[in-house]
Image (tube, helix red, strand yellow):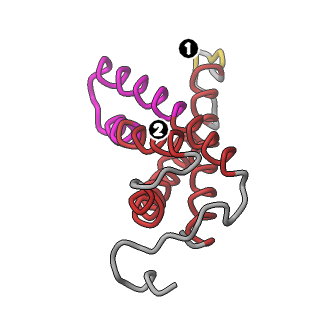
Amino acid sequence: MTPLERWSLHLAALTTAGTGLLDGLLRWFGQRAGEFGPEPHPWLGLVQHLHVLAAPVLVFTLGVMARGHLWPRLGQTLEGRRTGLGAAVLIAPMVFSGYGLQVATSPVGRNGLAWIHAISAGLFLLAYAGHLALRGWRPSVLPAVEHVSGGPLADR
């Protein structure tokens, strides 16, 4: 991965995680007593929209990471492999449950998808943070790996 790809991934993960955590906190603990009963926090809508806008950027950067980092290293035995594979396995349930939340109409289905999304996203964040901690946030701890396919990035 190039430094631009790496930092784009970190920034997208940080933005998506931050807005997701804030969304959960406001949803679960931010209710206010209104004139006709409990009302959602006034910032909940804005935070939810920011999360929904940041998430596709994260999905895109995860795809770039899979091509330039995950696939080339699958056959190697490197430190951080367990946390990296753990994070990679959690991407699908996190992403699909997040998209499912936007289209689910049944309260039971929506509640189930919300739990799946919260748990898989939380575990993904732990694995991602562990992966970065093992790597030590250094730009070139691991040896350079050539890109699998040709293209404009293969010549770097």
Horizontal placement of 108 versus 152: left or right? left
Q: What residue is rendered at 42% in x and 86% in y?
A: 152
Quick one: SS at disc 1?
A: loop
Residue tagged 1: 36
Q: Residue at x 60, y 45 (%)?
A: 131
Q: How many marks can you see?
A: 2
Q: Quadrant of residue 110?
A: top left
The kind of residue on which mark 2 rests is Gly
Q: Give the labeled residue for mark 2.
A: 86
In-front residue for pair 128/36? 128
The image position of residue 100, as x and y in percent, is: 31, 37
| 101 is within the stretch colored magenta | yes
In front: label 1 or label 2? 2
Residue sitting nearer the eye, 76 or 120: 76
Is residue 23 placed above or below 60 in the rendered structure? Answer: above
Report crowding for label 2: few under 14, some 14 to 19, many 20 or more residues within 10 A (C-alpha): some
Residue sitting at x 29%, y 22%: 109
